[in-house]
Image (cartoon, grey):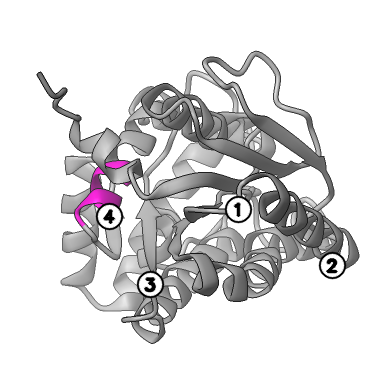
C-alpha cells in the first residue's frame, strides 16, 4: 500500500537541500525542524552568527558562521555553501529561505543610526546579495526562494519606520523577482506573518507578555502556512485570518490615514513598554 503524503510533505518533494539564513532561532529554527521532520533526508545549510542549538529531527545540518550585515562575510559563506552542495548533494532542487532580519522600536534614529543601518544591511542588502549569488545555481538545479517579509510591508509603520520599509522592499522585490523568473524553474514566495513569538520582541526592545505578543502567531504556524503556500505555487501568503483582514482594510484607506492609524497603535505599545 502506498503511503499518502500530507500537503506539507508534498511541498518538499522536489527539494534535496535547504539553504536558510537565521536558522538558529524563531521562524528559521522552525523551518529547519519542520522540514527535517517531514523529509529527514534533506541537507540543511544555515547561515547565521549563532550555531543552532537543540534542533530536533535534523540528520544533515551544516552551520556556516557569518555576520550577514557584512558583505564580505555573506559573499564568503555563499561560495562555501554552493561548493558543499555541489560536492555532497549533486542532484535535486534547492530551497533558499531568506529569513534573517530584525527590528527596532522608537522614533528614528533610535536606538542609534548604526543599528538602523545594520537593519537595512541584514533585512535588505543581505537578502539581495545572497539571492543574487545563489541564483545561477538555482537556475541550474531548479528550486524556490522563500522571503520572510511581514504584514508591516503593507503600510508605513511610525515608531518602526525603517523596519516596515525594509519589509515593504522585500515584499515588492520578491513579487517582481518571481515574475522575472517565470518559466525558469525557480519560483519565489513572500511570507507575511504578523507578530510572531520569536526573539524579535527582545531585539526590537519590547517586553514579553505585551498585547502584541499575546496575540501573536507561533513560529510553527508561520512555517506551516509557508509550506502550504509553497506547495500551491503561490507567490505571497499573509499568515493568519485577522492579519489578512487588517491588510485588506488597510488597502481600502489612503496611505496617509493608514500611517496615522499604525502610528497611534505602535505609540500605544511604546507607552505600555515604558517608552517615550
Q: Position of residue 142 (x, y in %)?
A: 45, 65
How much space separates mark 2 and mark 4, taking CA atoms?
A: 29 Å
Give the mark nearest the N terminus, 2 or 4: 2
Q: Main secondary structure of the magenta part?
A: helix
In the rendered structure, does residue 141 fall within the stretch colored magenta? no
Q: Secondary structure at mark 2?
A: helix
Q: Is residue 217 left or right of residue 81?
A: left
Which residue position holds label 1? 90
Residue 58 location, quadrant: top right
Q: Is residue 18 above or below residue 199?
A: below
Residue 216 in which image quadrant: top left
Q: Which residues are magenta?
A: 226-232
Q: Nearer the viewer, mark 1 or mark 2?
A: 1
**N-terminal of the two: label 4 or label 3?**
3
Would residue 207 be visible to someone looking at this image? yes
The CA distance from mark 4 to mark 3 is 20 Å
Identified at 60% across, 69% down, the residue is 137
Q: How many marks?
A: 4
192 versus 181 height, above or below: above
Of circles 3 and 1, the one toward us is 1
Nearer to me, 119 or 79: 79
Identify the mark at residue 237; answer none if there is no mark: 4
Instruction: Tell me the tag on residue 185.
Output: 3
Residue that mark 2 sits on: 71
Say if the magenta span includes residue 228: yes
Label 2: how many Cα within 10 Å (few below 14, some 14–19, many 20+)? some
Which is more foreground, mark 4 or mark 1?
1
Viewer-side label of 2, 3: 3
* Residue drawn at x 60%, y 18% as measured from the top left: 55
For the C terminus, give its image quadrant: top right
Amino acid at each position: 500500500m502506498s503511503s499518502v503524503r500530507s500537503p506539507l510533505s508534498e511541498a518538499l518533494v522536489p527539494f534535496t537541500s535547504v539553504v536558510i539564513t537565521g536558522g538558529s532561532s524563531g521562524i528559521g529554527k522552525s523551518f529547519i525542524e519542520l522540514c527535517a521532520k517531514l523529509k529527514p533526508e534533506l541537507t540543511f545549510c544555515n547561515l547565521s552568527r549563532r550555531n543552532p542549538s537543540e534542533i530536533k529531527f535534523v540528520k544533515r545540518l551544516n552551520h556556516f558562521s557569518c555576520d550577514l550585515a557584512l558583505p564580505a562575510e555573506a559573499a564568503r559563506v555563499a561560495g562555501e555553501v554552493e561548493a558543499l552542495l555541489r560536492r555532497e548533494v549533486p542532484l535535486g532542487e534547492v530551497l533558499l529561505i531568506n529569513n534573517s532580519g530584525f527590528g527596532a522600536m522608537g522614533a528614528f534614529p533610535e536606538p542609534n543610526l548604526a543599528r538602523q543601518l545594520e537593519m537595512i544591511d541584514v533585512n535588505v542588502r543581505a537578502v539581495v546579495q545572497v539571492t543574487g549569488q545563489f541564483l545561477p545555481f538555482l537556475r541550474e538545479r531548479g528550486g524556490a526562494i522563500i522571503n520572510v517579509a511581514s504584514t508591516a510591508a503593507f503600510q508605513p509603520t511610525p515608531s518602526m519606520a525603517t523596519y516596515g520599509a525594509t519589509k515593504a522592499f522585500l515584499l515588492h522585490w520578491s513579487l517582481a523577482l518571481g515574475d522575472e523568473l517565470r518559466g525558469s524553474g525557480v519560483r519565489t514566495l513572500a511570507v507575511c506573518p504578523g507578530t510572531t513569538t520569536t526573539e524579535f520582541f527582545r531585539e526590537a526592545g519590547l517586553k514579553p507578555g505585551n498585547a502584541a505578543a499575546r496575540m501573536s502567531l507561533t513560529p510553527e504556524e508561520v512555517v506551516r502556512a509557508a509550506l502550504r503556500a509553497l506547495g500551491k505555487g503561490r507567490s505571497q501568503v499573509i499568515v493568519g485570518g485577522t492579519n489578512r483582514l487588517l491588510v485588506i482594510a488597510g488597502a481600502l484607506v489612503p496611505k496617509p490615514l493608514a500611517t496615522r492609524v499604525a502610528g497611534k497603535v505602535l505609540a500605544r505599545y511604546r507607552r505600555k513598554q515604558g517608552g517615550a
